[in-house]
Amino acid sequence: MDEFLPGFTGRLKSAVAGAAGAPLVFLGNFEVEEVWAQGEHTLPRFSAASGSAVVNRMDEFALLLAGEGDHVVLKTAPDEAYLAYLRELGLALPTVHVVAEQDAQRNVTEDILRDPALPAVLTGLAGQGCRLFPHGVSVLEEELCRRTGMEIAGSPADLCKSVNSKIYSRRVADELGLRQPAGWVCETVDELGEALGHARKLLAQGRRTVVKEAFGVSGKGIVVLENERWMDRVHRMVGQKVARSGEDRIAFTVEEWVPHQGDLNYQFTVGHDGAVHFDFVKRAVTEGGVHKGHRIPAALGPSRLAAVRSAAELLGKRLAADGYAGVVGVDALLDEADGVWPVLEINARNNMSTYQVRLQEQFVGPGMTALARHYPVRLERELDFAGFRRILGDALLTAPGGSGLLVNNFATVNAGGRVRPDEAYDGRLYGIVVAASAAELTALDEDITARLVAEGVSHAR
C-alpha cells in the first residue's frame, strides 16, 4: 500500500460521518490541548509561552482540508488574492463563514460562541445534515453543538481528552508491547517522587530525562531534568501547587530522553465501524536543533516502515475498542540502529500534516519530493498576498505538476499585527515546497528564504 492514497477527505468523511460525501463544517481550533488541560496541575514555567495570536490564525488551514459542499468558519475573511490563487491552482473551496468580531487571543470556537448571529447560521446547516469536524473536540465544541443542534463528526470531548493524555499513550503502548522510552506515569505527588528517583539513577548513568504534562502541547508543559537540583525544584513546586489547591491528583509522565536519529509523525484514521486506515508517515526536518518542517515522502527503509504500520494497526484497533473514532497522530523516533521507537505520544486530534494530505494528493505526484514548513516573517505593517506573490515571483507554485512554494496558510502572516498595530510583529508563512528532486527542493527552499530576507520581511538565514 502506498504511503499516500487518493481521496483522503472522502475517506475521512466515511470514517467520522458515515459517507464520503457527507457535508462537514470544519473548525481549526488549534492547541485544543489548552482546553483539555484546564483544571489540571501544570509544571513550573521556566520560559515564555509562544504567542497565541499566530496559533489561533492557524484556523485557516481548515480551508484546504474542506472541499466543495463543505463549510469552514474562520476568525477573519481570507485575503481575496489568496483565494484567487487557490482557485487558480484548481482547488475547489468550501463556503466560508466569518465571525462578527474576532479576538486574537481566542480560538475560533470561542469567537463563535460569542457571536450574536453565527450560531443561528450553524443551526441552519445542522438542519441540512452538516456535522461539525473540529481540529480537536473539547467542551467548547460540545457547547457549540448543544447551541446549534449540530452533531460532532468524531468522538466526544472526554474520550478525546483521555486518549490524548500522555498517560494513556504510555499505558496503551505497554499493554500492546510497543517499544517506547523508559518512563513512569505520575498521578500523585508520591508517584512523581518515585519516578524522579528512577530519573536520578538514569542521570547517574549519563542518561537524560524529562517530565511532561499529560496535556502539554507544542513544546510547552515539558521540563528537561538536567541535574538533581532541577528534579528537586520540580518536585517541590508541584507539591506546593497540589497542597494549595486541595486537589491531589496530577497527570505527568517522567521519561528518558533517548538518543535518536530523527523524529517521525504518522497518522491513521479510525472509523465508527472500527476500521483502521493508515494515512501517512512523515519525517521531521530540523536545523540547529529547531523543527523546520516535514519531508515528503519520509524515505524510510522497509523495516522501519513496517514497524510504523504495524504499530498504527495495533493502536488503531485498541482505540476503536475504547470507542474512539477520528484522526489519530502519533509521534515516534528513529533510533541509531535502523529501528523505531513507534510511540512517543498519541494525539487524538488533527495534526499539522492532516491539512497537507489533500494538497499532496493533487500536487506531489509520483517521483516528486516536498518539504512542508513555515518561513518566519517580521513585518512593520501588514503585507497582503499580492505583495508576497511579488516577492516570491517564480518560486511560487502556480500549477499542478510544477515546482515551487504552495502557500497553504496566509492568515498567520499578519496575525500579530492585529495585537500591536503600531509595532513590528512576527508571523509565519506556511507552505509546501514541491520539487522534482531533492537537490531542486533544497535550492528552492534556500531561494525562498533569500528572497524574503532580501525584501526585508524576514531575518531568517
Image (cartoon, grey):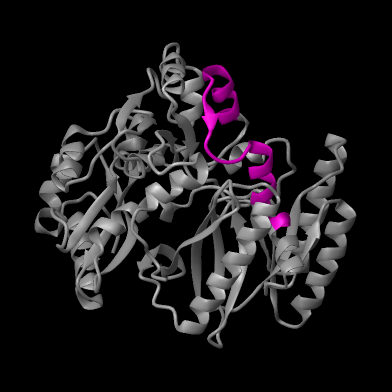
Residue sitting at 54 percent across and 29 percent down? 151
456 lies left or right of 161: left
Q: Quadrant of residue 39?
A: top right
Residue plotted at (29% across, 28% down): 77
The front one of 283 and 212 is 283
Q: Quick check: is 146 in the magenta stretch? A: yes
In this view, which residue lies farthest toward the bottom?
337
Q: Is residue 60 placed above or below 351 in the rendered structure?
A: above
The magenta stretch is: 140-168
Q: Is residue 420 visible?
A: no
Q: Is residue 300 left or right of residue 93?
A: right
Identify the residue at horizontal 20%, vertical 51% (top origin).
456
Residue 283, given in percent of the width and then of the height, sits at 43, 70
Residue 217 sits inside the magenta stretch: no
Left/right placement of residue 93 relative to residue 390 reads right
Residue 325 place in picture, x, y as percent: 58, 47
* 57 with respect to 403 (left or right): right
